[in-house]
């Protein structure tokens, strides 16, 4: 069972980093296929916490090679910063770097003018609460066929022309937003500074990934963001500019759908969202604050407080459908401990009547229909099997499993590796 995709089923931050790190103990490759430094994936080992943004979450497993595939957008300066941080924390070393980390030469470069445009837009009326990392403008350049793949850095004269053309194209936009762009000279200074360290990491990564799959080696495709932030399937226009859903694992890394064996959907036991956009089950009361504080729901990229709310079962059924989710990793169940009652959204009231469907096009007006379930008081962080959980927690899990039609593979009850109940390991059948 070698090709496994891990995908966020909500609005991101479901705990993908933890679960990818857990699953990849013996995996050959971990492949990030979409997004860029807008992601923040947290890995906790012992008392140490590491947040990766561009580097895949398999980096702590020394036998695992990490691939940044061509569906990603990569800020080369930030990538080097992240590598240096991992080296300073002794999670990587200079000698093994090239064998541990491979970057697609066709992944597009996020350059300072992308960041400038993203930030300028976020000051205006069109703000949607992006991470201001230049992700949207970089994908825009790619779609407009004026982007700069990292492989272009091999030819400085060519890069210089591309940079000049991109800055020229963005200049009227910057002017209309009342801001300025960095000069082509400044951008080229950056390119010259980073290229000697970036070029040795570059490869045609689709061949690397397919070779591993052909040899039947374990390959994990690490999604970033989440289903409801997907450009095609999310709450448009309050979305990111890439394809976080499982289909993106194929287009973003250059493997065929026939190579994917299992899709695991990451589901947080409640819902969070960072940035703007509809969120029907949002809690703006003391219960929402409680979830935020107990779950430490503050953005790992920007530090922004995350919006919190109840679990949305129609939303999860939608995620199961658009990703083809075969199994669920449910995280942060421990955060629900201490609540008297737990509400779950089971359907929606819409102008057309009651429905079990997720009203993706009418989210701002549709009214969630809730059912109330019993809460539990006990701490559950030390649970090692389902039988260790209080009855009310098991009833909550049973309900989720039944309603969304996908089995639970994992139940996570804390941020550490050992705070996990593994019911089905994707790379070795049982637990
Ligand atoms: P990602 O973007 O999906 O990788 O998720 P983030 O790392 O941005 O956010 C998830 C946060 O929850 C991180 O701080 C994790 O350490 C933490 N976390 C993951 N699983 C659990 C869990 O089961 N319980 C608790 N309490 N924290 C968890
Ligand atoms: P991980 O991988 C949560 C959100 C932003 C904003 C929208 C567009 O850690 O789950 P962008 O900078 O991508 O143009 O912002 O998408 N967003 C995320 N929210 N987790 C993420 O990643 C996110 N990446 C982007 O907050 O609403
Ligand atoms: Mg995150």
Image (tube, rainbow, N blue to C red):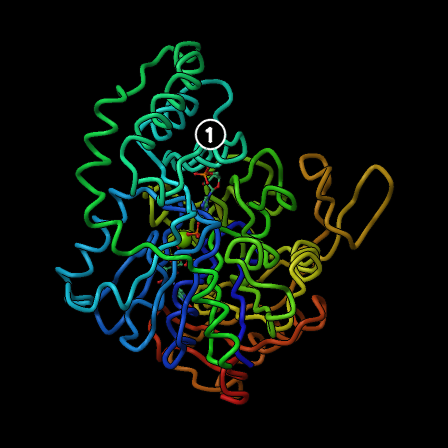
**Is residue 281 or residue 28 the one in the foreground?**
28
Q: Could you tell whether 257 is left or right of 168 in the image?
A: right
Residue sitting nearer the eye, 194 or 385: 194
Residue at horizontal 87 percent and vertical 40 percent from the top: 352
Asked whether residue 310 is in view, the answer is no
Between 329 and 207, the one lying in front of the other is 207
Decide which of 210, 93 is in the foreground and name it.
Answer: 210
Q: Residue at x 56, y 63 (%)?
A: 255
* Residue 414 placement, left or right of 258: left
Instruction: Give the number of callouts.
Output: 1
Q: Which residue is mark 1?
A: 146
Mark 1 residue element: loop
Toward which corner of the image does residue 50 lie, by quadrant?
A: bottom left
Q: Is residue 282 above or below residue 142?
A: below
Q: Position of residue 317 (x, y in %)?
A: 70, 60
Q: Look at the image and tell me in which quarter the N terminus lies.
A: bottom right
Q: Residue at x 34, y 52 (%)?
A: 53
Q: Could you tell me if residue 104 is visible in this image?
A: yes
Q: Is residue 59 above or below residue 383?
A: above
- Would you identify the image quadrant in which residue 404 lies? bottom right
Which residue ends up furthest to the left in the rendered image? 88
Find residue 265 and report its horizontal and vertical position in percent: 57, 65
Query: Image quadrant of ligand 1?
Result: bottom left
Q: Residues within 10 Å of mark 1 (few under 14, many from 20)?
A: some
Residue at image x 57%, y 59%? 250
Q: Quadrant of residue 295?
A: bottom left
Q: Position of residue 322 (x, y in %)?
A: 68, 56
Residue 68 horizontal/vertical position (percent)? 39, 56
């Amino acid at each position: 069972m070698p090709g496994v995709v891990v995908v966020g089923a909500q609005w991101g931050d479901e705990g993908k980093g933890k679960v990818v790190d857990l699953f990849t103990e013996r995996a050959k490759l971990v492949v990030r296929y979409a997004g860029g430094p807008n992601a923040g994936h947290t890995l906790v080992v012992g008392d140490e916490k590491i947040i990766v943004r561009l580097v895949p979450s398999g980096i702590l497993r020394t036998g695992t090679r990490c691939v940044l595939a061509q569906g990603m957008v990569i800020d080369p300066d930030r990538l080097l910063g992240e590598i240096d941080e991992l080296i300073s924390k002794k999670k990587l070393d200079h000698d093994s770097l090239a064998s541990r980390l491979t970057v697609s030469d066709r992944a597009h470069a996020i350059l300072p003018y992308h960041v400038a445009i993203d930030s300028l837009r976020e000051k205006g009326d069109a703000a949607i609460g992006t991470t201001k990392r230049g992700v949207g403008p970089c994908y825009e350049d790619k779609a407009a066929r004026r982007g700069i793949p990292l492989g272009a850095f091999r030819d400085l004269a060519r890069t210089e022309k591309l940079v000049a053309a991109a800055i020229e194209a963005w200049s009227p936009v910057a002017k209309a937003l009342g801001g300025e762009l960095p000069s082509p000279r400044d951008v080229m200074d950056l390119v010259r500074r980073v290229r000697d360290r970036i070029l040795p990491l570059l490869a045609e990564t689709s061949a690397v990934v397919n070779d591993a799959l052909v040899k039947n080696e374990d390959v994990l495709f690490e999604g970033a963001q989440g289903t409801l932030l997907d450009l095609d399937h999310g709450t448009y226009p309050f979305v990111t500019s890439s394809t976080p859903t499982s289909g993106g694992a194929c287009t973003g890394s250059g493997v065929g759908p026939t190579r994917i064996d299992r899709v695991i959907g990451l589901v947080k036991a409640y819902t969070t969202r960072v940035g703007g956009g509809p969120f029907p089950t949002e809690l703006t009361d003391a219960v929402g604050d409680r979830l935020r504080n107990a779950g430490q729901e503050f953005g790992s990229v920007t530090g922004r407080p995350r919006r919190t709310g109840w679990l949305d079962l129609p939303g999860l059924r939608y995620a199961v459908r658009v990703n083809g989710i075969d199994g669920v990793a449910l995280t942060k169940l421990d955060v629900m401990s201490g609540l008297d009652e737990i509400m779950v959204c089971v359907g929606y009231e819409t102008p057309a009547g009651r429905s079990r469907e997720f009203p993706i096009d009418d989210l701002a007006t549709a009214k969630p229909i809730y059912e109330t379930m019993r809460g539990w008081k006990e701490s559950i962080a030390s649970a090692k099997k389902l039988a260790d959980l209080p009855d009310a927690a098991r009833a909550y899990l049973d309900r989720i499993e039944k309603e969304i039609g996908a089995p639970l593979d994992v139940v996570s009850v804390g941020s550490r590796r050992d705070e996990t109940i593994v019911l089905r390991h994707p790379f070795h059948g049982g637990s």
